[in-house]
Image (tube, grey):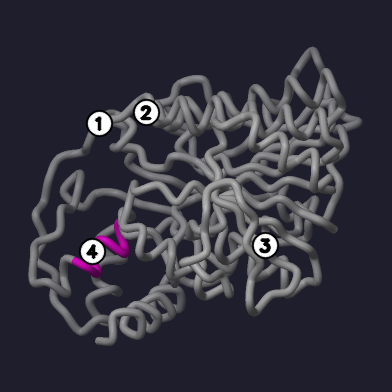
Amino acid sequence: MKILLTGTAGFIGFHTLNKLIKDGHEVVGLDSINDYYDVRLKYDRLKECGINTDNIEYNRLTASNTMPAYRFIKLNLEGRENLHNLMKNEKFDKVCNLAAQAGVRYSIENPYAYIDSNITGFINIIEGCRNFGANHLIYASSSSVYGKNSVQPFSTAHNVDHPMSLYAATKKANELIAHTYSHLYKIGTTGLRFFTVYGPWGRPDMAMFKFADLMRQGKPIDVYNFGEMERDFTYVDDIVEGVCRVIYKDQQGNPLWDSSAPDPGSSSDPYKVYNIGNNKPVQLLYMIETLEKELGIKAVKNLMPLQPGDVHKTFADVDDLIRDHGYKPSTSIEEGISKFVHWYKNYYNL
């Protein structure tokens, strides 16, 4: 297939690109390379995939030197004309939208960045699918949409109308927009609610990477809710396997969907939402302890109260992913952290 993959300079996008190319597909990667975190890491991911970063110009395709089926373009999703020209000229079979303004706490400080990228950018992507022939849009949602829900594990059958951050609200909005387009235009749409992804080439704003950086520098780490938190940490390779299985299967409507008792996670239209999580929550303090062992550094913990927008626990119900795609993430936290630290030490020449 010919696939448009947004967010290819990002963490999950980088790994997804490598998997798609390995599986024999043609990929155009798109990224704005914004400065939400250190752009050097983004450029290094691009270099790892054969992109000569000195040749990158806005709105111009650059071919990979090592992956003949990969080309990269620097674009903002909110730039509708350039995005639609790309989609019109390239005629993609499918679109996988992993680009977004990420981060729960940052959304409290910079709300407009989330509206621009996650709302305006998303409508531009799905309008491009409608007008230029892509028959399936796969897009990143988030476990953050569960908000004030307290029933565990989180299920796509649960109501998610009580978000606790603007970031979560934009992801819920993406799901609503996707359903509307699936209904009106019969575009297949699949939303993927990711649960705390980690691993090599990760995001330095996320806890595991951030903790490793601070520990290496001998600085204290902020541990929220005094460590009384659990996260369904999911290794990036497990996430990518789930993403690609969804890409490779066309989305159909649910023939059992009942409008008198509607399932929020599916529809009679070609719309579906999946959780992709490890289905095994880990105590935050255990994650830190395991990271300490792998790094050989003892963390200095700064215990703090729960932050606005944060939830105490995430726990993914992945039954429908198993049922529809025969897949469940399985990498243990011990194995995943070991692989992350191995990459981290190599990347920083430790």
Q: Which residue is mark 2?
A: 165
Badge number at residue 211 = 4
Quadrant location of the C terminus?
bottom left
Q: Nearer the viewer, mark 1 or mark 3?
A: 3
Q: Which residue is mark 1?
A: 308
Instruction: Estimate the x, y position of residue 141 in percent, counting from the top left.
Output: 56, 39
Q: Earlier in the sequence, mark 3 or mark 4?
A: 3
Q: Are marks 1 and 2 in contact (CB under 8 Å)?
A: yes
Q: Main secondary structure of the magenta part?
A: helix
Asked which secondary structure carries label 2, the reply is: loop
Residue type (three-letter) at the residue carrying disc 3:
Arg
Residue type (three-letter) at the residue carrying disc 2:
Ser
Dot 3 surroundings within 10 Å: few (below 14), some, or many (20 or more)?
Answer: many
Q: Earlier in the sequence, mark 1 or mark 3?
A: 3
Q: Earlier in the sequence, mark 1 or mark 2?
A: 2
Q: Are marks 3 and 4 in contact (CB under 8 Å)?
A: no
Relative to residue 92, is residue 319 drawn left or right? Answer: left
Q: Is residue 284 visible?
A: yes
Q: CA distance from mark 3 to mark 4?
A: 34 Å
What residue span does the magenta drawing correspond to? 207-213
Image: 30 above or below 100: below
Residue at 62 percent across and 62 percent down: it is 62
Residue type (three-letter) at the residue carrying disc 4:
Phe
Residue at 56 percent across and 24 percent down: it is 173
Q: CA distance from mark 1 to mark 3?
A: 40 Å
Residue at 80 percent across and 26 percent down: it is 182
Image: 289 above or below 3: below
Q: CA distance from mark 4 to mark 2?
A: 23 Å
Q: Which residue is mark 3?
A: 71
Residue at 75 percent across and 31 percent down: it is 266
Q: CA distance from mark 3 to mark 2?
A: 35 Å
